[in-house]
Amino acid sequence: MSRKTEHLSDELHAYLLDHGTRPDQVQEALIEETATLGGVARMQIAPEQGAFMEMLARILHARFAVEVGTFTGYSAMSIARGLADGGRLLCCDISEEWTGIAKRYWERAGVSDRIELRLGPALETLQSLPPDPEIDLAFVDADKGGYIGYWEELVPRTRPGGVLLIDNVFAGGRVVEPSPSDDMAREIKAFNDHAAKDSRVDLVMLPIADGLTMARKL
């Protein structure tokens, strides 16, 4: 099983999974293959986060979603499954190796026709999108130093009532340190401060996995 929500005991985490939508066979297989990659497997989202994102896409009746940071494709599969009929998901990543795994599982899950993958710097991909506010749902789980830049490209392109999800906003709990010693925590802390002051959205920080900020465009 992939990384779980922080601060839950193993017993409570198992209970949480047992009383929600469990990963299906395709998702389980993707979790298992991703685990063989070693330490980088921790970049895969938790199963409960995937279930939440799929449900949110359904609630929003999302027709256009954007993901920054795809890795082996679990989060994209979750979003794609929740899209409205005719909906599409644009995935931004730089790794042909990891997204190669993703594409195989998207095919198995029957969602590959809803997903467009663009390999290259995500900021350039976002800047190439029309400026109109057409995004229903955005998910960012990529290089933490790029978060503010991604945010500034995504917020204006998100429709009123649309939602942005930003992953890893706890940085393993280190964001509460006055002066974090590592770059990731410092970058996340700077982003969290930036987003919290943004008058274009209202937001809540959810204790899912390593912290998930959910922002609604006003």
Image (cartoon, grey):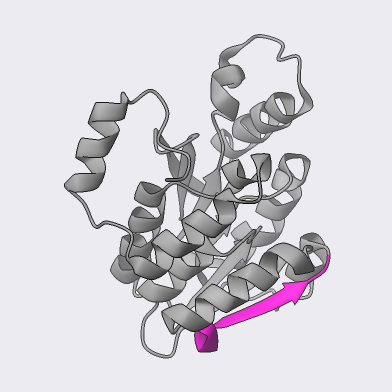
Residue 117 is inside the magenta segment: yes
Q: Position of residue 93 (x, y in %)?
A: 73, 64
Residue farthest along the front direction in this orientation: 36
Residue 20 is inside the magenta segment: no
Q: How many numbered callouts?
A: 0
Residue farthest along the top direction in this orientation: 178
Please, is residue 196 above or below residue 158 in the view?
above
Q: Is residue 125 left or right of residue 17?
A: right
Q: Position of residue 107 (x, y in %)?
A: 52, 83
Q: Position of residue 154 (x, y in %)?
A: 64, 60
Q: Position of residue 151 (x, y in %)?
A: 66, 51
- Give residue 124's quadrant in the image: bottom right
Residue found 47% across the figure and 69% down from its top: 77
Please, is residue 204 above or below residue 135 in the view?
above
Q: Is residue 185 visible?
A: yes
Please, is residue 159 above or below residue 198 in the view?
below
Pick the front one: 73 or 197: 73
Quarter of the rendering occupied by the N terminus: top left
Pick the front one: 88 or 9: 9
- Give residue 134's quadrant in the image: bottom right
Pick the front one: 11 or 149: 11
Q: Is residue 198 left or right of residue 56?
A: right
Please, is residue 136 above or below residue 88 in the view?
above
Magenta region: 112-120
Residue found 69% across the figure and 74% down from its top: 131
- Give residue 193's quadrant in the image: top right
Residue found 58% across the figure and 41% down from its top: 42
Q: Is residue 134 visible?
A: no
